[in-house]
Amino acid sequence: QTTSSYNTENFRILTSLRPSILLRFLRAGYSPFYNDVDMVWKANLFATLMEIHHSNKAFLVRGKGGAYGDGANTSTIFMRPTKENLRFVQAWKEEMELMDMNGAKMKHANDQFGFNAVLNGREAGRDLPRIF
């Protein structure tokens, strides 16, 4: 079993680190850009990212159906170090920690489940506003 094998325990461990890594960059005042290595862009993404860089928004890839419903896909993320984004990524990190505590129930859950729970304001029994 390799780290790159999709939906394995190693894959879940690796992807569960994503919110912690993004949070470190945001807290340091950087605007992190995360893109999975298996993503291919057919058009120049940098013009869109520059528009977002001069705003308080974040860039996410929205899903259409599938395992994650109509939520966001965590394959590509660009965030500015705003209070809202810091709060969101902190809640995402906490959601991943809760999922780890419920290990048996969430054995094959990866970070996208936690991400979309927070994105839709459902994490940890709290009612967060949707920020994207």
Image (tube, grey):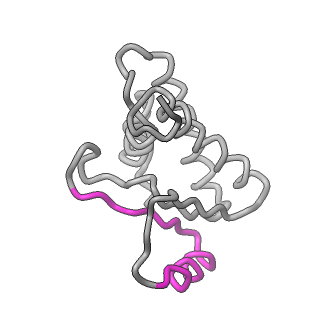
Question: Relative to 62, is 108 above or below?
Answer: above
The image quadrant of residue 42 is bottom left
Residue at 38% over, 45% down = 116
Q: Position of residue 51 (x, y in %)?
A: 55, 82
Given the current orientation, which residue lies at the most extreme front position?
1
Question: Relative to 36, is 102 above or below?
Answer: above
Answer with left or right where residue 49 lies relative to residue 40.
right
Question: Relative to 52, is 18 above or below?
Answer: above
Residues in magenta? Answer: 44-64
Indicate yes or no whether the magenta region holds residue 54: yes
Question: Relative to 38, is 93 above or below?
Answer: above
Q: Quadrant of the C terminus?
A: bottom left
Given the current orientation, which residue lies at the most extreme left position?
65
Q: Position of residue 61 (x, y in %)?
A: 39, 63
Q: Position of residue 45 (x, y in %)?
A: 50, 79
Pick the residue in front: 81 or 7: 7
Answer with left or right where residue 7 lies relative to residue 78.
left
Q: Position of residue 41 (x, y in %)?
A: 43, 75
Residue at 57% over, 46% down = 89
Residue at 48% over, 61% down = 76
The image quadrant of residue 16 is top right
Given the current orientation, which residue lies at the most extreme top position?
104
Pick the residue in front: 42 or 95: 42
Indicate yes or no whether the magenta region holds residue 78: no
Residue at 56% over, 81% down = 46
